[in-house]
Image (spheres, grey):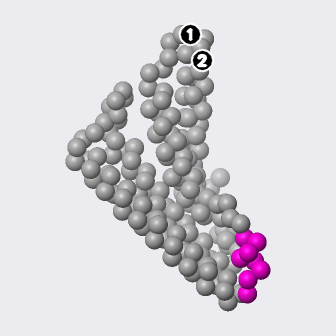
């Protein structure tokens, strides 16, 4: 895999790493708890972080690849002009929600920085864990904007456009 492909899919790579850590920690936790009768005390903390990071990083990748669940049967039977209007409305609603969640994420981040809160067992700063909220929102905004640009301005299939970039 080329360096540019890895960089353009960095969120997906990081989500994959978080998923691998989640599986390893969960498997290790089961082994230690039931076979060695010595539970890993910090496992639950790490699992929660991994879930959070997988969710926000994976959502950005899902926007980029159009992998979010959608029921398009009604949309597809509408006239093309109505579809264009609904596409713009959908984009504006999605961007509005992402901007709002990003704003709340920065608010949470500044609060965590101000109060110096850390996790209970491993003492990891909470700002580091919660930084994924605004970061994930920014990634989703970039991905959905790029998808709409390629699909509706350049009038190309996003996957086809991605294939041209590789060549």
Q: Earlier in the sequence, mark 1 or mark 2?
A: 2
Report the residue at 61% width, 59% height from top. 62
Q: Is residue 149 visible?
A: no
Residue 111, relative to residue 146: is it above or below? above
**Percent coordinates x, y for residue 76 in the rendering:** 75, 77
Q: Residue 152 sits in which quadrant?
A: bottom right
Report the residue at 72% width, 70% height from top. 72
Report the residue at 54% width, 10% height from top. 37
Please say whether residue 73 is one of the residues in the magenta stretch: yes
Q: Is residue 41 visible?
A: yes
Tell me the quarter of the image containing the C terminus. Answer: bottom right
Residue 121, relative to residue 80: is it above or below? above
Secondary element at tag 1: loop
Q: Which residue is mark 2?
A: 31
Q: Does residue 89 appear to the left or right of 78 in the view shown?
A: left
Within 10 Å of disc 2 (Cα), the crowding (few <14, some 14-19, many 20+) is some
In front of the other: 71 or 41: 71
- Residue 36 numbered mark, or none: 1
Q: Residue 123 sits in which quadrant?
A: top left
Q: Which residues are magenta?
A: 72-79
């Amino acid at each position: 895999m080329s360096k540019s492909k890895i960089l353009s899919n960095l969120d997906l790579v990081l989500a994959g790493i978080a998923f691998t850590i989640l599986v390893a920690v969960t498997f290790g936790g089961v082994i230690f708890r039931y076979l060695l009768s010595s539970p890993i005390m910090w496992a639950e903390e790490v699992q929660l972080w991994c879930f959070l990071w997988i969710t926000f990083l994976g959502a950005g990748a899902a926007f980029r690849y159009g992998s979010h669940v959608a029921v398009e049967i009604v949309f597809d039977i509408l006239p093309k002009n109505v579809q264009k209007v609904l596409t713009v409305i959908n984009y504006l609603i999605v961007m509005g929600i992402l901007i709002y969640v990003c704003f709340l994420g920065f608010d949470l981040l500044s609060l965590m920085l101000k109060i110096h809160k850390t996790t209970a067992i491993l003492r990891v700063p909470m700002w580091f864990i919660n930084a994924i909220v605004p970061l994930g929102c920014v990634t989703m905004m970039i991905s959905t904007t790029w998808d709409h640009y390629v699909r509706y301005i350049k009038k190309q299939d996003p996957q086809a456009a991605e294939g041209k970039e590789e060549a």
